[in-house]
Image (cartoon, rainbow, N blue to C red):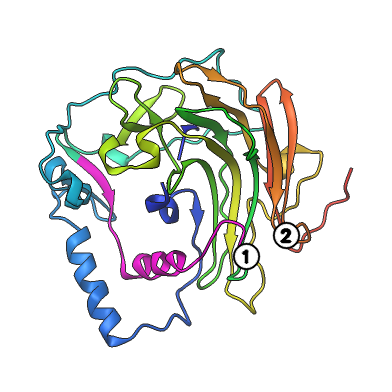
């Protein structure tokens, strides 16, 4: 799977393991009523085409509830005016098995968009995420292991991308585990996206055929109304204080045998001209090296290769 970019709004539903129940999450009666109202707003009327994935009329999707999009002129026939230009063909690791993303039966009818039905547990989880503070603050149980561009880098990006390995880590209760490619400028960040040079909209494409999933209009951003100046590739995990740490990736701290670890390959950015290039001026960052790790293995047959993960209480000899 190849992803260009990165949006905190969808972080909780993308490449995140959510096994287990929501035991121990306290919600007052007032909060429960508020959540029910949110569900009514978010779950729009759907066609009879799915159960957990609803095919919603393009013009009735929740995105258009945004106050800056009330008088939009968008249509389901819109396409990006240009696609990222790759310097070379993608090469997946030999041990990797391809993952196909899609809906059974050929997808949604023309004029509708597939939207995962939101549950009350999703809203509770997102409310929990919203209480987590700044990136480096792990006081609330959130940990990161990423390769990131350095603060002194003056490079500008219109997107970032990678092939991402997918896993199903076991998490309990309020834990979560995620992998992401992220770009940022000021207060704005995206966790899937690249910028259309013609109009400034940020598009999400996926797969080797550059399937167009959707876009975020330029008008809803401030910092990302311009170019991005920061990018990262890696994992995130959260556990409530006083509980065991959640696994990240495969649950193993990186070793020098790629098939054991969660990874990103073909790590790259899109420069101001829409060209896919190798990223420089980067650093490895893990907020707790005793629990999680990240390892930049440099450029090989599968491009820039980055491993990350830990801890599942399984220890491999560090070869």
The residue depicted at 20 percent of the width and 26 percent of the height is 78
Relative to 18, is 282 above or below?
A: above
Q: Label 1: few (<14), some or many (≥20) within 10 Å?
A: some
- Expressed as whole percent of the image width and height from the top left, the position of residue 191 reads 45, 43
Residue for badge 1:
138
Secondary structure under tag 2 reads: loop
- Expressed as whole percent of the image width and height from the top left, the position of residue 140 reads 58, 71
Marking on residue 115:
none
**Numbered marks: total:** 2
Q: Is residue 122 rendered magenta in the image?
A: yes
Q: Quadrant of residue 142?
A: bottom right
In the image, farthest residue toward the bottom: 29
Residue for badge 2:
288
The residue depicted at 41 percent of the width and 37 percent of the height is 101
Q: Is residue 94 rendered magenta in the image?
A: no
With 25 as the anchor, is 285 left or right in this view? Answer: right
* 259 and 241: which is toward the camera: 241
Callout 2 touching callout 1 (CB < 8 Å): yes
Q: What is the magenta range?
A: 113-137
The residue depicted at 50 percent of the width and 66 percent of the height is 132
Residue 94 in view of the camera? no
Q: Quadrant of residue 242?
A: bottom right
- Sequence-first tag of 2 and 1: 1
Secondary structure under tag 1 reads: loop
Residue 220 in view of the camera? yes
Q: Label 2: few (<14), some or many (≥20) within 10 Å?
A: few
Query: The C terminus appears in which quarter of the rendering?
Result: top right
Instruction: State the CA–CA distance, disc 2 to disc 1.
Output: 9 Å
- Expressed as whole percent of the image width and height from the top left, the position of residue 194 reads 41, 30
In the image, farthest residue toward the top: 87
* 102 and 72: which is toward the camera: 72
- Expressed as whole percent of the image width and height from the top left, the position of residue 65 reads 17, 52
């Amino acid at each position: 799977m190849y992803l260009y970019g990165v949006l905190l709004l969808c972080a909780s539903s993308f490449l995140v393991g959510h096994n287990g129940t929501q035991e121990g999450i306290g919600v007052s009666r007032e909060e429960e009523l508020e959540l029910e109202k949110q569900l009514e707003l978010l779950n729009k009327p759907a066609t009879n085409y799915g159960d957990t994935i609803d095919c919603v009329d393009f013009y009735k999707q929740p995105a258009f509830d945004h106050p800056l999009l009330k008088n939009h002129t968008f249509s389901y026939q819109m396409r990006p005016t240009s696609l990222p230009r790759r310097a070379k063909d993608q090469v997946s690791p030999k041990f990797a098995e391809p993952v196909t993303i899609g809906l059974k039966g050929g997808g949604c009818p023309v004029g509708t968009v597939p939207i995962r039905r939101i549950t009350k547990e999703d809203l509770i989880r997102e409310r929990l995420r919203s209480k987590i503070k700044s990136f480096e603050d792990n006081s609330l149980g959130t940990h990161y292991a990423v390769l990131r561009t350095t603060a002194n880098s003056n490079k500008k990006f219109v997107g970032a991308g990678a092939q991402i390995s997918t896993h199903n880590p076991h998490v309990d209760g309020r834990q979560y585990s995620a992998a992401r490619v992220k770009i940022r400028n000021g207060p704005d960040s995206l966790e899937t996206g690249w910028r259309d040079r013609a109009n400034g909209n940020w598009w999400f494409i996926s797969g080797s055929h550059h399937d167009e999933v959707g876009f975020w209009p330029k008008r809803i951003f401030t910092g990302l109304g311009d170019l991005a100046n920061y990018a990262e590739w890696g994992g995130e995990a959260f556990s409530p204080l006083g509980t065991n740490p959640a696994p990240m990736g495969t649950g193993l701290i990186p070793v020098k045998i790629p098939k054991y670890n969660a990874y990103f390959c073909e790590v790259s950015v899109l420069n101001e001209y829409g060209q896919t290039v190798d990223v420089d001026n980067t650093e490895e960052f893990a907020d707790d090296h005793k629990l999680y790790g990240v390892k930049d293995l440099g450029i090989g047959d599968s491009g820039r290769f980055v491993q990350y993960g830990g801890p599942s209480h399984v220890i491999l000899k560090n070869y």
